[in-house]
Image (spheres, grey):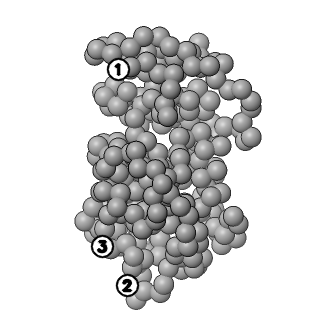
Amino acid sequence: MTDRSQQEDTTVTRPGPDEGYAEAAPPGEQEVVDLRDLAEAEPARPASGRPADLLPSHNLLRISGGELWDAAEAFVYDIYRQIGYCEESPRRRVEELPRWNDRSIFHAVIDDDGTVIGTVRTIVGRYSELPVGKFERTDSHLADPVCELSSLTVRTDVRSTGVIEHLYRAGWLDAFRGRSNAVVALIDEWLFDVFVDTYHLPFTVVGVAQEYMGGVPIPVALPLAGRHYVDMAMTNPEFWRWTLEAVTPDEARAWNLPTRLADGTVVVPGAATAQTKA
């Protein structure tokens, strides 16, 4: 699929089997997973590694209303209009989205001048009630509630400054802290490939692609259970270490998030005995 966002100076997404792991153990015990023999072949793309820190002039804010909310909506609208993702609106907003305002949060990166340069919107609810629910679902094993990442939109001139990664992490944390069971999204195939092949995020396709708002996105899901991040902790350790910097120790334990030790083993809190996955 052609990356029209590159052609139009934007990066956007639209609104809108486990084996080899030990069974759960009594509190306080840990599973140690040695994954140094995990990869049978080198990945097609190099792992992303640690994202850049935000520039000193860039501030990541969590927005639930007010003037900043309006500015974030207008930012998304202006970019979507440029690339044909939405109809014109006199209110300068994507008119498909206001119905979910009462269950939404915006995260935005704003520069010192007050200009929005990147956004992500989180919408929490039952899968069938969210924008992704408009698509035929082929995998229903992830229970409700889920958190949809919508309006992930970044100006091209700040792409290499860590903005998109900080927005993703903010949305992912919102989903975990809100007790969602998964992150879901409608994204183009090229972006799905980047998330999986470059960042090694455990996204899977959970529905059928269809025409929607000027493109043909696919429904994808990212489970919110620690065991799903073991492979990423091993194969993209710097990105995973950076992800954990935003998580408190109590959260890491409660969510059973893996950590990678200096010798390359991956420790999963709350699991039973040591186990190796080849």
Q: Residues within 10 Å of mark 2 (few under 14, many from 20)?
A: few
Amino acid of disc 3: Arg
Q: How far across and down, in percent of the image, does residue 151 sit?
A: 46, 64
Q: Along the polypeptide, which appears first: circle 2 or circle 1?
A: 1
Residue type (three-letter) at the residue carrying disc 1: Ala
Relative to 277, say whether 208 is above or below: below
How far from the left and from the top, in percent, is residue 210?
55, 69
- Along the polypeptide, which appears first: circle 1 or circle 3? 1
Quadrant assignment, res 238: top right
Give residue 186's position: percent from left, percent from top.
50, 61
Give the label, 1 or 3, closer to the camera: 1
Instruction: Determine the image quadrant of residue 244.
Output: top left
Q: Amino acid at mark 2?
A: Arg
Mark 1, secondary structure of its residue: loop
The image's mark for residue 24 is: 1
Q: Mark 3: which secondary structure? A: helix
Q: Which mark is residue 91?
A: 2
